[in-house]
Amino acid sequence: MFRIWIPSGKLTLAVFYIICEVKNMSYYEASEDNIPTKKDSRGFTVYYPVCHICGASLMCWSYTRNTQYTCKDCRELLIERAEDKKASLLAEKQKRCLERAVDRISRITKIEKYHSSIKWVENHLGKTGWFQSTEEVMVTLELIRKNVKAHHQVKIYNYSVDFILPDYKVVLEIDGKLYHGKDKKEYETVRDKAICEKLGDGWQVIRIDTDCINMKITRLVPAIESVLKRRKAITGMEERAIKVS
Ligand SMILES: [Zn+2]
């Protein structure tokens, strides 16, 4: 069997030589490129290349040719710009969801009824985590139109729930067709139980199929109410049954 064995003392020496080589390389390249250098109090070389954006001189412990050096201020500015770009891309994506939502609702009912709901969504475009699909926007528009108080994308433990309707004690989840099957069912049971336990007594999760949203969005609130009414009736029967026995 082939083995490489380096005694620890020699390894330390090897690392030391590599560092020295890199340092030497830094030094030669820096002097060739006219990069100002200084020795610090312990005799180490300090390099002062310039920021590739603003030209300010910045302090480094090594120098590598053809590297873009960026000062702290310019780096923060770059990060800020990248975040702005990300937010505007997100808002664009959400805007397209809103346009599709308006288009789908227009085919079902008079869109004029949704005027203030649409305005509200427009004012909230760009919010991280919100309006991830056209159906989510449709549900948002419908809940606002029907004056149903709701919280969108709420974190409960590690789960993110689509909508919480506090007055109904309902967690509303939009169910896509993408992940169906036994595993999903089991996962959902565990998830729903944990969520309802966290929210307290009387809470329940209602899942609405994306097809239902796309075809019968105006039936959303009555459907939730009928689920709750049915559940109340069943609970009442159970209570009576307990009393009778
Ligand atoms: Zn700079």
Image (cartoon, helix red, strand yellow):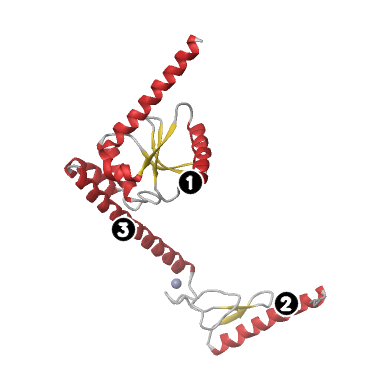
Instruction: Give the residue displayed 42% in from the left and 67% down from the top.
Output: 78
Numbered mark located on residue 130 in the image: none
Camera-side mark, 2 or 3 = 3
Q: Is mark 3 within 8 Å of ligand 1?
A: no
- Amino acid type for the residue under numbered disc 2: Val
Tell me if residue 157 can be seen.
Answer: no
42, above or below 185, in the image: below
Q: Is residue 1 left or right of residue 70?
A: right
Q: Which residue is mark 1?
A: 181
Tell me if residue 109 can be seen.
Answer: yes
Instruction: Give the residue displayed 52% in from the left and 45% down from the top.
Output: 183
245, above or below 74, in the image: above
Instruction: Give the residue displayed 44% in from the left and 64% down from the top.
Output: 79
Q: Which residue is mark 3?
A: 92
Cα distance in 3D space between marks 3 and 1: 33 Å
Dot 2 alpha-carbon crowd within 10 angstroms: few under 14, some 14 to 19, many 20 or more: few
Residue 116: % across, % down = 22, 42
Question: Under tag 2, what secondary structure?
Answer: helix
Residue 241: % across, % down = 47, 14
Q: How many marks?
A: 3
Question: Under tag 1, what secondary structure?
Answer: loop
Q: Which residue is mark 2?
A: 15
Q: Going from the N terminus, do you reach mark 1 or mark 2 first?
A: 2
Cα distance in 3D space between marks 2 and 3: 51 Å
Camera-side mark, 1 or 2 = 1
The residue lying furthest to the top in this view is: 244
Q: Going from the N terminus, do you reach mark 3 or mark 1 first?
A: 3
Cα distance in 3D space between marks 1 and 2: 55 Å
- Amino acid type for the residue under numbered disc 1: Gly
